[in-house]
Image (cartoon, helix red, strand yellow):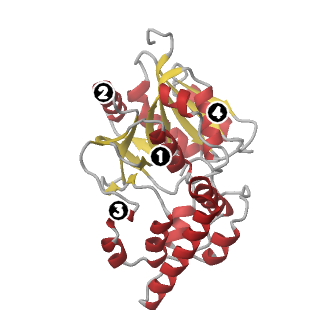
Amino acid sequence: MSETGRLQLAVVVLNYRTPGLVVDCLKTLEDEIAGKDGREVVVVDNCSGDDSADQIERAIDVSSWGSWARVVRSAVNGGFAAGNNVGIGASNAERYVLLNSDTHVRPGAIDEMMRTLDEHEDVHMLGARLEWPDGKHQVSTFRYRTPVTELISGSQLGTLGRALPRHVVAREMHEFTKGIGWVSFACVMLRREVIEQVGMLDERYFMYFEDMAYCRRATACGFIIGYQPEAHVVHLRGGSSPVKEQTLAKKRRPNYFYAARAHYFRDFYGMSGFVAANLLWTLGWVLGSLRGRSGAVQGQFHDIWCSPKHTVEIGGGHGGA
């Protein structure tokens, strides 16, 4: 416990019908949390509607994890942001880690993130190095999406990215860095004061864009975001959500992706910015198509303009981004 009587750290893992993934994640957290004073894991079952929560609780009991892990059941499935807010609200801690269910924490990763915040008091949010099971790096540090970034996204033309490097969203990083735009919330550590000043995650985002939006709000308040590549976390990517796989296969994305995208652009750029983002994406799509390239997936032209409200889709996954 800290001098304030709060826990030092609470790790929030969100579950939506992925009990096997959650249990595997907990196994990798055991050495990071168990026996270390003032640390706990809160698993939020996002109203799965099946026996997920029961399965996870049985695994906690059988594995004797009850001293550091517990399940909190949400009454509704409000999405990624809402589920994480339930977990944050369930624990009184100085620092929080939001962790996807489809992650495996490498040994020492949590300690490394804690050490980094101890040594860098000017860093308030910290991302870890996300990687594939074979250790290959995943990009998890980014610039903000703007209307101009949609031109590059729609075209899939490397020439546009090279001509507009400051509007390429992904930022490849391999060294400790602070003062970046945003980091993936598949694994992020936040100081309590960020939540106290910025507030909880915006629940108007059912899933996707909520991490970028939260980082924008935090940096607007003067908080600094860092990246620590010495903290290694395997991200199975897609285990808790189908969107990335659908994108790669050019299949239609779920409604909640476009609802979140529309909310993001309207929230930070207004209706005119939202229209500009769509027009620039369309221009990029035309340019890419002329060169035999296109960033479009099935139904995208319709969906970015119509921006349907999200629907809870069975099997769609709402446990992580």
Residue behind mark 2:
115
Q: Inspect the image, locate mark 3, and give the three-letter code of the amino acid beneath it.
A: Arg
Q: Residue at x 52, y 42 (%)?
A: 217
What is the crowding at mark 3: few (fewer than 14 residues within 10 Å), some, or many (at least 20)?
some
Q: For the residue labelled by badge 4, is the local secondary structure a helix, a strand or a loop?
A: helix
Residue 205 is left or right of residue 21, and the answer is: right
Task: Tell me, yes or no, whether the two marked residues, 3 and 2, touch with CB atoms within 8 Å.
Answer: no
Residue behind mark 3:
166
Q: Closer to the camera, 282 or 46?
A: 282
Whether residue 121 is situated above or below residue 16 in the rendered picture: above
What is the crowding at mark 1: few (fewer than 14 residues within 10 Å), some, or many (at least 20)?
many
Residue behind mark 1:
186
As measured in the structure, the alpha-carbon distance from the residue carrying label 2 to the one carrying label 4 is 26 Å
Q: For the residue labelled by badge 3, is the local secondary structure a helix, a strand or a loop?
A: helix
Residue 307 is left or right of residue 320, and the answer is: right
Residue 86's mark? 4
As measured in the structure, the alpha-carbon distance from the residue carrying label 3 to the one carrying label 2 is 31 Å
Hey, which quadrant is residue 69 in on the image? Answer: top right
Q: Residue at x 71, y 44 (%)?
A: 77
Q: Inspect the image, locate mark 1, and give the three-letter code of the amino acid beneath it.
A: Ala
Name the N-terminal-most of marks 4 and 3: 4
Whether residue 309 is situated above or below residue 71 in the rendered picture: below
The x, y position of residue 157, in whole percent, is 38, 78
What is the crowding at mark 4: few (fewer than 14 residues within 10 Å), some, or many (at least 20)?
many
Whether residue 178 is situated above or below residue 309 in the rendered picture: above
